[in-house]
Amino acid sequence: MEQTLTDLFNSTIEEHHANQTELCRGLCSNATLTRYLSGERRMDRLLLSAMMQRLGKSPDKFVSVLTDAEYRYFDWRLQVLNRIADRDWSGLERLILDRETADKELNEPLQEQFTLMVRGLLQERLRGDREGATDYFRRAVCATIPGFRGLLRPQCMLCVQEISALLLWQEYYGDEEISAALMKFLIDYVYEYFEDEQERVKVYPRLVSAYLPYLQERNRDQEIYVITGRAFRMMLPLRYFICGEQLLNAYIESAEKLGKGQEVAKRKEQLASWREMRKELWSMDRESGHMDGAGVMSAEGALTLQGCAGSTACTVQREDQPADGTEHGVKEAEAKEASSSYADNWLEGGYIWDLWQEPELLREVIERRRKQRGLTQEVLSEGICTPETLSRIVTGKRAPSRRNFRALTKKLEVRSEYYYSVIEAKDFRLLEERFRLDALIETKQWQKAKKAAGRLKAQLDMESRYNRQYLGEIYYLIELALKGIPEQERVGRLLLLLSLTISDYTLTENVREWPEAFWCTVFTSEEISIMLQVINALRCMGELGDGIYLAERLYVYYHMSAVRPEFHFRTFMGVLAQLSILLGREGRNEECIRYSYEGIALCFASRKMSDMGLFVNNIANANERLGDKAFALRHYRYAFYCEELLGNNSDIPRKSYEKLCKVERR
């Protein structure tokens, strides 16, 4: 995969007629990049993201094996974003003071840029110094764009963080025309240059949201209609909803002014229902921490509910919400939604985490595999390093040298790369094809997925067990949808796929018999995905207890890691969805509701809404069983409109709503 990265950088530079100097600008020297690409040095995750985004590509095609220093930094950033979302400026300042010195293991200009952006917010929000804030934002831009004076060269290359810094600067700079020209440049740049759908969708809606007030003041309705419609066409196939309410509202209003009201009538209904749902679900108590209205979620604990039945069923109440029922949290949320300030919404209204793909912690990979193989630290370190050095590596006190990293991973028979993909491919374009195939599967476009899988198979090395495993699951899902697979064959077929990469154990179809040592494995996202399909198969066979057992083991597995579960967003969301479904079918309503609300919190935090309708529908189901029919009706309606808005092909909530309406009328 390191060769794939090298080829990616070289081919993309050639394709865009870019030069290495521009790619490195403000981040590192040409000589340093050469050493990274030759394998002499390891590129840290922060720099990798910026470099790939400057090339218009997404780093999310790779799983990252992180050092402790890297993970601590990303975890700190998440805490910073939580404080911004909470408007906890004093707490935010303490966090910034705790990290006065840049970490030597990560790219220093990018660390400095982020810190300067946050200091700018503090300068204005905590001290009321707008001029000082503007200077901080200017310095943030100049950290990686030296000599910036308000204009960008046409051939410039930008990463997502740089775009955020530019937007903050233009808002505070004070020259409306320069600000508008910069935003228009950035919108066109992202749309044309960010070829990767994963990366483009993270940024384009936020840019449009920042540009809207300028266009609305000048009644430029046709332009609003075009760019907001484009933003939605970009988001919905991938099930994102970034700055969604503001963009959808602007799209509807511009369409009506242009005489296209008929075209957006259904969208108006969907938006009204979404807003009603969001107000009800916006703020949630947690055992420790909470999810605030901005959608950035604290990591610890599971959601706790004020009640599960009766008139207060599933009411969520913040600590700052008065006992008399004043909707403080909802009012605060409405104030945020009404705000046109990019600073108010920076990293909260449309924030997506730094780590999307499934990151692993290096020390956990080494230590779990060592225990799994029954090796002592002395035996593992023999011929590689001293036992003391290994001890410092597995406790996160130091990162291994490249030589030691390769020797340890070879001895443990795990992948000897810091960045790798679910599939093994030498051409980055195949990783992009794999992402598009996953999107077709997620949106249930089975015939298109079948053709795409065939094209990908023809280009992959099928001697690779990782490629066979990935495509094996894809073909299993396609066959299941188009032809059907006998229930009694499903678990066995899935276990065969799992055994391609986990051969140390013989796994039987009785999941409760899987050995405890199996759960010490550091699973790949593909292995977790296959286990989620095993749970699906058990559910279809009526083996709900076994399905719950396996889902709960996976839930515990994620909480055993030092890495927050939400950094494993995709697969952890699958675990929550399975628990929500299975516990509901078992009649364990309170638990179903708890996991469903945890999933909703994750949807709001990530802005990835694939399972939002499912969780809301399951909450409605549980409350119907608990006797609160009014609550259930309301949430069935939310779920139906949510699925319709996002283009999910599910009419289950609508049927449940209509059925309950008939019962209530009787």
Image (cartoon, rainbow, N blue to C red):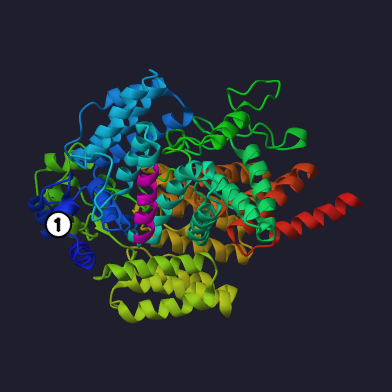
The correct choice, above or below, for 543 with respect to 98 in the image is below
Q: Residue at x 37, y 35 (%)?
A: 175
Q: Residue at x 27, y 35 (%)?
A: 140
Query: What secondary structure prevails in the magenta region?
Result: helix
Residue 414 drawn at (x, y percent): 24, 59
Residue 547 drawn at (x, y percent): 56, 57
Label 1: which secondary element: helix
Q: Is 449 in front, or is 251?
A: 251
Category of crowding for the residue at label 1, using alpha-carbon neighbours closer than 10 angstroms: few (below 14), some (14–19), many (at least 20): some
**Left of 634 or right of it: where is 331?**
left
Magenta highlight on residue 185: yes
Reading the image, the residue beneath label 1 is 20
**Left of 370 or right of it: where is 234?**
right
**Left of 535 or right of it: where is 139?**
left
Quadrant the N terminus occupies: bottom left
Residue 540 drawn at (x, y percent): 62, 66
Q: Is 540 in front, or is 36?
A: 36
Q: Amino acid at mark 1?
A: Gln
Q: Residue at x 34, y 30 (%)?
A: 118
Q: Residue furthest right?
A: 666
Q: Inspect this view and state whether residue 387 appears.
A: yes
Q: Residue at x 86, y 53 (%)?
A: 663
Magenta highlight on residue 341: no
Magenta part of the chain: 180-192
**Left of 448 or right of it: where is 666?**
right
Where residue 107 sits, quadrant-wise, is: top left
Where residue 426 sits, quadrant-wise, is: bottom left
Q: Is 659 in front, or is 91?
A: 91
The correct choice, above or below, for 87 with respect to 471 in the image is above
Q: Is 249 in front, or is 99?
A: 249
